[in-house]
Amino acid sequence: MSDWSSYALRDFIPFAPDVYFRLLARMGESFWPMQLFTLAAGFVALILALRGRGRPALALLAPLWVFVAIAYFEQRYANLNWIGRYLCWAWLLQGGALLVLALTGSNSRPAAAPGVATTGVLIALVGLLGFPLLVPVLGIGWQQAEVFGLHPDPTAVATLGLLLIVLRGWVQWLACAIPMLWIILSAFTLQVLEAPWYTALFAVLAAAIGGLIGGAWPVTLRNQA
């Protein structure tokens, strides 16, 4: 039996940093200028969410998760890492869940607590604006930037923020599970690849967990009243 204590986190990342970041860059290059439209869709979804139009906001997210599942994980990432095909199915599942929520959910949910809504907006803006702003840091062209709706990290982060705004209760926790799991996996991957912004993903995760707990707290108090 192998001794698992002899393995380091790096042993589970089967690619070098330059290979991984080139994959991200080629994703942007291959679909330019599609990211302009996906980014616009993200801002529209955020505006809809803030106006209490949760169902159309979720409907905008669903096809983007399906696109990332196929175009990124199945067709590209799986060539580097065998887990890519399983991640593809996870992202397809999330896309289907978002579509179901968009079709069957209600626009009359109680408003999120102010602190939770603010957390959701900030997280969504990290996903929509934070990753493109890494362009000058990385010294790459705008066509190579990680963008919501095209790359997994900004898509998962922005989606997580939007879910904090539009959903409530146990449905919110379930809907946030796959985005949070990907953020954890990606943060550890970036840590191994020595990308300094991995700490931002852990910060997003901590803020999201705080938002989920903060959103559940008023419900618990109402049930006890």
Image (cartoon, rainbow, N blue to C red):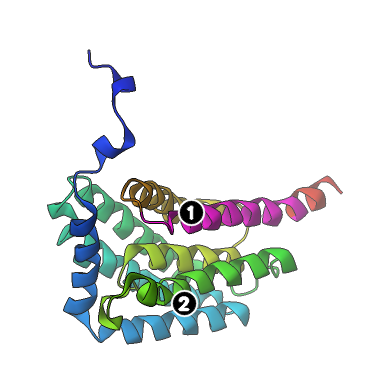
Which comes sooner in the sequence, label 2 or label 1?
2
For disc 2, the neighbor class at 10 Å (few under 14, some 14 to 19, many from 20) is: some
- Residue 139 versus residue 221: which sits nearer the camera? 139
> 10 Å neighbourhood of mark 1: few (<14), some, or many (≥20)?
some
Q: Is residue 11 left or right of residue 42?
A: left
- Residue type pointed to by label 1: Thr
Mark 1: secondary structure: helix
Q: Residue at x 41, y 86 (%)?
A: 40
Depth order, front residue of 129/172: 129
Residue beneath disc 1: 199
Tell me residue 28's x, y (percent). 24, 75
Q: Which mark is residue 129?
A: 2
Tell me if residue 88 comes above or below residue 130 in the rendering: above
Alpha carbon of mark 2 to alpha carbon of mark 1: how far?
Answer: 17 Å
59 is higher (above) or lower (below) than 81: below
What's the magenta bit mostly, secondary-structure-wise? helix
Residue 75 among those drawn in magenta:
no
Residue 179 picture location, percent across and down: 43, 56
Which residue is nearer to you in this view: 30 or 87?
Answer: 30
Q: Determine whether the residue tagged by mark 2 lies in a helix, strand or loop.
A: helix
* In the depicted structure, whether residue 223 falls above or below residue 74: above
Q: Residue at x 36, y 76 (%)?
A: 135
Q: Position of residue 102 (x, y in %)?
A: 46, 71
Residue that appears at 69% across and 67% down: 112
Q: Which circle marks residue 225 in the picture? A: none
Residue at the far top in the pictured view:
1
Q: Is residue 46 visible?
A: yes
**Part of the protein shown in magenta:** 195-218
The mark tally for this picture is 2
Specify the amino acid type for callout 2.
Leu
